[in-house]
Each structure stands twice: as structure tokens, then as C-alpha cells.
Image (cartoon, helix red, strand yellow):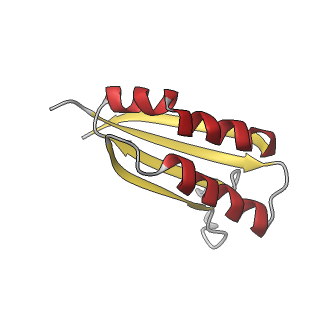
């Protein structure tokens, strides 16, 4: 069995409002869910109530995708729906942090 890949992305928006955060989550759902090889998908807004000193507050929306394999991850990165997501939303991003890891 190949190693699974966790792809976790944290988006910080230029304009962080309830509407802009919800719009980005909706765009994630439209473009980034239901890809071949995805074992788990979720996207959501940062929970403001998670405010312990160890909680990173420097993001607005988080994306979590677990892929069956590195090949599935790589195919997703080049997929037209992923590319459309970037094209449609890039101008709204102040920062994007991507954390990819091998998981079991």
C-alpha cells in the first residue's frame, strides 16, 4: 500500500468578512471536493472560539484533503478544477500556507 498524503492549506484573505470566508469555503467545496483518490475532504472557517495561546489565529479558511497516494495528490494539483479554483480566488488571498505530509 502506498503512503497517504495529507494536504492542508491555510488561507488568509485580504478582506476577512463572514461573506468572503463563506465564499471561499463554497469555492473549495465546488472545485476541490470529489477528486479521484481523495479519502477525506473538508474546508471551513477558523473557529474564533479556539483562542488558546497555542492556536494559530493567522488564517481565515482551512482546507484538509487526504489522498490515497502521492500520484493522486500530484494529479489533483494539475486538475482543471484545482487550477480553476486558484484562478478564481487568488486575488482574494493575502497569504496561503501549504502543509503536505506523509501519513499512515
**Which residue: 63% across, 42% down?**
85
Relative placement, left or right, of 4 versus 24 is left
Residue located farthest toward the left when viewing the structure as drawn: 1
**Which residue: 54% across, 33% down?**
80
Above or below 44: residue 3: above
**Which residue: 81% across, 65% down?**
17
Viewport quadrant of the C terminus: top left
Q: Position of residue 3 (x, y in %)?
A: 25, 32
**Which residue: 43% across, 46% down?**
65
Q: Quadrant of residue 38?
A: top left
Residue located farthest toward the front when viewing the structure as drawn: 80
Q: Position of residue 59 (x, y in %)?
A: 69, 52
Above or below 50: residue 54: above
Count of marks placed on residues: 0
Residue located farthest toward the right when viewing the structure as drawn: 15
Q: Quadrant of residue 45?
A: bottom right
* Residue toward you, 49 or 70: 70
Q: Quadrant of residue 86?
A: top right
Relative placement, left or right, of 26 versus 100 is right
Above or below 32: residue 25: below
Above or below 79: residue 56: below
Q: Position of residue 11 (x, y in %)?
A: 67, 47
Viewport quadrant of the N terminus: top left
* Residue toward you, 27 or 70: 27
* Residue toward you, 46 or 18: 18
Relative placement, left or right, of 42 versus 18 is left
Residue located farthest toward the bottom when viewing the structure as drawn: 49
Relative placement, left or right, of 72 versus 84 is left
Q: Position of residue 83 (x, y in %)?
A: 60, 33
Amino acid at each position: 500500500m502506498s503512503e497517504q498524503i495529507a494536504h492542508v492549506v491555510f488561507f488568509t484573505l485580504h478582506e476577512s468578512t463572514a461573506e468572503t470566508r463563506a465564499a471561499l469555503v463554497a469555492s473549495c467545496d465546488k472545485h476541490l471536493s470529489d477528486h479521484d483518490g481523495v479519502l477525506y475532504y473538508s474546508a471551513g472557517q477558523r473557529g474564533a472560539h479556539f483562542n488558546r495561546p497555542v492556536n494559530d489565529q493567522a488564517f481565515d479558511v482551512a482546507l484538509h484533503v487526504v489522498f490515497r497516494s502521492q500520484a493522486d495528490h500530484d494529479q489533483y494539483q494539475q486538475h482543471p478544477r484545482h487550477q480553476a479554483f486558484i484562478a478564481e480566488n487568488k486575488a482574494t488571498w493575502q497569504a496561503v500556507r501549504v502543509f503536505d505530509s506523509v501519513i499512515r
